[in-house]
Image (cartoon, rainbow, N blue to C red):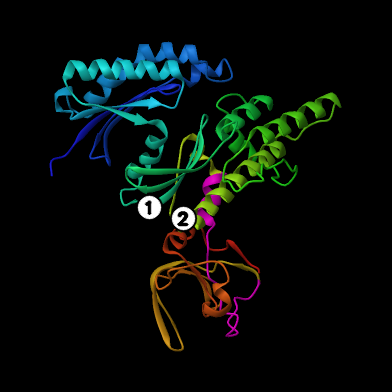
Amino acid sequence: MEKKIILGIESSCDETAAAIVVDGRNVLSNVIASQIDTHKKFGGVVPEVASRMHIEAADGVVKAALKEADLTLEDVDAIGVTYGPGLVGALLVGLQYAKGLSLGSKKPLIPVNHIQGHICANFIEHKDLEPPFVSLVVSGGHTFIVYVKDYDKFEVIGQTRDDAAGEAYDKVARALGLGYPGGPKIDKLAKEGNENAIEFPKAKFHEQTLDFSFSGVKSAVLNYLNKAKMQNIEVNKADVAASFQKAIVDVLSDNVFLTCKMEKVNKIAIAGGVASNSCLRERLITEGDIVSGNVNNDCATPAGIYSLVYKQKDTVLKGEGYASPVDFWMPFNGGIGIHDASWRYTFGGSIYVSNGSHGCINAPHSLANAIYNNIESGTPIICYY
């Protein structure tokens, strides 16, 4: 099959970007003209300024992308461009430029949904990723949970009803005097604070929904800071940042895990600017359904606090009447440890009561892999019921 070369153009917010992609998986070039330094002065993105800067940068980034890929426009099979959602003026710049390029070169023009673009970026980063999976899209302007049924079939399961998560981050960061963009600055400061110091609200709707609301937690932080200022009370900014971040990440992770259970999917792909948040990534990587020791056979996994002894790949676990090959083995209590269990099709719930393990923690392959890549000897492991 002949390779398809696509020129992609993006201008939905404060970055003008162009990329050359082959067969939707391999990036030959990716050129970005960022406006962050300009918008920092205003404490956030100014739409009119963004639009003008897109006009100045569009032609340059496209030419640079073609040059970096060592191609000409003649080599391109089609042109893709973001049509929304995003800042209207900014989107129009990219759209009009792409339309002109398409007409002049007689190349097909493909309109691309901004949110679908975020999701599909995972296919570039993870070459072996295939649907179905659940995607959490979190950025400065959008917060969605999307069930990706196939490469071109998407179902929105939940979305924000007011502020996007990234927008809340930016506004809280501004109130704390951290500047723009707020996400990375709060993430960094939160590492120095106590996430349980302040209990900020987490929105829960009465009806059956996996939608989000972040205006409440944002307002709660602003009110907390204003009250402290009026009473001349010194605020621990690191504690505020950590507690605010915990409130956001708790809701995001809870809803995405509920979606996985509802759709019977064990793969999560995150996308958008907030996807780089270290707290969110850590939470999603290390949580998931497991099966512990069989209670009815007196093989219950002993409760307690342990430490990882070591980790090993590709071994065979042996015991009375069994020899089970596993890809990931992480012992923490004698012969008891965490490992993948390819022989199981379901995890979680009350399986452990009558169909549990010989004492180990059985995990889906993807979860065991993620834990293996994020754990080291000496890491505390807490077992509880």
Asked if residue 333 shows in the view, the reply is no
Image spot of residue 231 (x, y percent): 86, 27
Is residue 283 covered in magenta?
yes
Magenta-highlighted residues: 279-303
Residue type for callout 1 = Pro
The answer to whether residue 104 is above or below residue 108 is above
- The amino acid sitting under disc 2 is Glu
288, 157: nearer the viewer: 157
How far apart marks 2 and 1 lie (CA) works out to 9 Å
The residue identified by callout 2 is: 263
Looking at the image, residue 360 lies above or below residue 163: below
Q: Which residue does the numbered mark 1 point to in the structure image? A: 132
Residue 307 location (% of width, % of height): 59, 66
Which circle's residue, 2 or 1, is located before the other in the chain? 1
Residue 254 horizontal side relative to residue 24, left or right:
right
Q: Quadrant of the C terminus?
A: bottom right
Mark 1 surroundings: few (<14), some (14-19) or many (≥20) residues within 10 A = some
Q: Are marks 2 and 1 in contact (CB under 8 Å)?
A: yes
Residue 6 is drawn in which quadrant?
A: top left
